[in-house]
Image (cartoon, grey):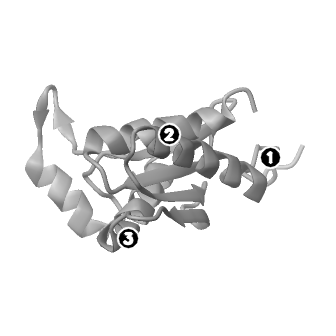
Amino acid sequence: MSLVTRNAPKLTLAGARAVLAAAERRAAEINMPMDIAVVDDGGHLLAFARMDGAKLSSVDIAIAKAHCGAIRRKPTGPVRDGEQINLIVSLGLAIGSRGRQIPLRGGLPLEVDGICVGAIGVSNGSEDQDVDVAQAGAQALVGA
C-alpha cells in the first residue's frame, strides 16, 4: 500500500470538449451566446469557447467561475447565512483570494463517482442563464 498514490478519475481533453459542446448546445437553445470555460481539478484551463456575440468582458469571468468551482469543490455564488447573502464574507473571499473565489453564480464542479475532476464556468447571460448552461455542460459527464 502506497501512502502517496491514489487511483482517481481525471478529466481528459475529450471529456472537457464533451462538457463544452453540451454547454454550447444549451446556450444556442436559449439563444444566449456564452463564454464557457472548462478546467481540471486544480483549476487549470482545458477548454474554452467564446461563442459569436458573447461579450469580451465575460471571458475572464467564465474562467474565474470555473477555477473557483474546481478549487472550492462546490458551485460558485455568494456566501449565505441561511437565506441572506453575507456580502462582507463574499467580498472578503474574493479579495483575499485575489479574485480566485468569485461570488457570482455560473461555476459548477464536475464530478465523477463523487470525485471532483474539474469545473465549468459560464458567463454572459443572467446568473440563472449561466447556471442553466453550466448544468447542461456538467450533465455530459453523468454516467462517465
Name the residue rendered at 60%, 42% in the picture: 22
Where is residue 2 drawn, in percent x and y? 86, 49
Is label 2 in a helix, a strand or a loop? helix
Tag 2 or tag 3, which sits nearer the N-term? 2
Name the residue rendered at 18%, 60% in the picture: 92
Of the residues shown, which amino acid type is indicated by label 1? Arg
Question: Which residue is identified by label 2?
Answer: 26
Is label 1 in a helix, a strand or a loop? loop
Question: Which residue is identified by label 1?
Answer: 6
Where is residue 43 drawn, in percent x and y? 54, 61
In the image, which disc is placed on residue 60?
3
Residue 74 visible in the current orientation: no
The answer to whether marks 3 and 2 mark residues whose Cβ atoms lie closer than 8 Å is: no
Indicate the quadrant containing the C terminus: top left, top right, bottom left or bottom right.
top right
Number of other residues with Cα within 10 Å of mark 2, as a class: few under 14, some 14 to 19, many 20 or more: many
**Distance between mark 1 and mark 2 Cα atoms:** 35 Å
12 lies left or right of 136? right
Instruction: Report the front residue among 103 and 61.
Output: 61
In the image, which disc is placed on residue 128?
none
Name the residue rendered at 22%, 42% in the picture: 79
Query: Is 65 placed above or below 96 here?
Result: above
